[in-house]
Amino acid sequence: MRKNLKGCKKLARETLAGNFTVPVIGSIAVAAMSVISSYISTALFPGDSLYAIIGGEVFSFILSLVICVFSAGLYRIYLNISRREAYSFGDLLYFFSHQPDHVIVASFVLALINLVTFLVFGFDKLKAKYKEKHEGARRVPEKTLFLLAALFIFWCVDKRRGYYLLTVGF
């Protein structure tokens, strides 16, 4: 069933009428967790030594996996709103008791793809910086960089689809 844009806007307005408090507070809570986790990581691992940098990155990575479980709960709230089912702020914690390992594995795979994608970008930038020293060094073609960026975006969208499938119960 196809609807025009005006009909979709009207449907969205009716669905969200008075139902925006929990999703907004949930979004703010997840964003605040991300900000606070970066401050905690910086406070626990100060300095610029190799061990402080690696320790801070590992700690941030672990906290980001936990925050991804909260994000999956936020997607559950969005899904329940669109289905016109009951939802509450407690749905943020839903995936801590219902298959949190699936969400963590999906987030871990996304993080690995992110790492590989941006390592290529980083090495290419490093080669460009020291081009005069390494004149014969081959750079990564722009089409390859674009393909890696598109792959990363595809996986971000696919992660949300995966959270949807986890919520539905497939």
Image: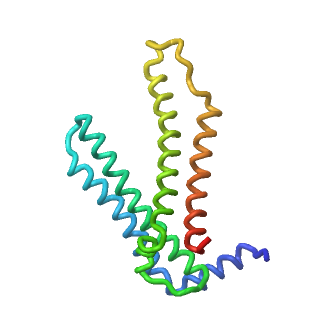
Instruction: Give the tally of numbered discs.
Output: 0
Q: Quadrant of residue 151?
A: top right
User: Which of 170/83 is in front?
Assistant: 170
Identify the residue shown where x is 33% and y is 51%.
Answer: 60
Please provide percent x and percent y for residue 98: 47, 73
Relative to 64, is 113 on the left or the right? right
Please provide percent x and percent y for residue 19: 50, 84
Please provide percent x and percent y for residue 86: 52, 87
Most extreme residue toward the right, as rendered?
1
Identify the residue shown where x is 38% and y is 61%.
Answer: 66
Q: Quadrant of the N terminus?
A: bottom right
Relative to 81, is 11 on the left or the right? right
Whether residue 84 is situated above or below residue 93 in the rendered picture: below
Identify the residue shown where x is 47% and y is 14%.
Answer: 134
Whether residue 53 is situated above or below residue 107 in the rendered picture: above
Residue 24 visible in this rendered orientation of the protein: no
Whether residue 109 is situated above or below residue 130 in the rendered picture: below
Give the image's coloring scheme: rainbow
Q: Quadrant of residue 163?
A: bottom right
Relative to 48, is 21 on the left or the right? right
Residue 150 visible in this rendered orientation of the protein: yes
Q: Quadrant of the C terminus?
A: bottom right
Please provide percent x and percent y for residue 64: 39, 56
Identify the residue shown where x is 71% and y is 73%.
Answer: 5
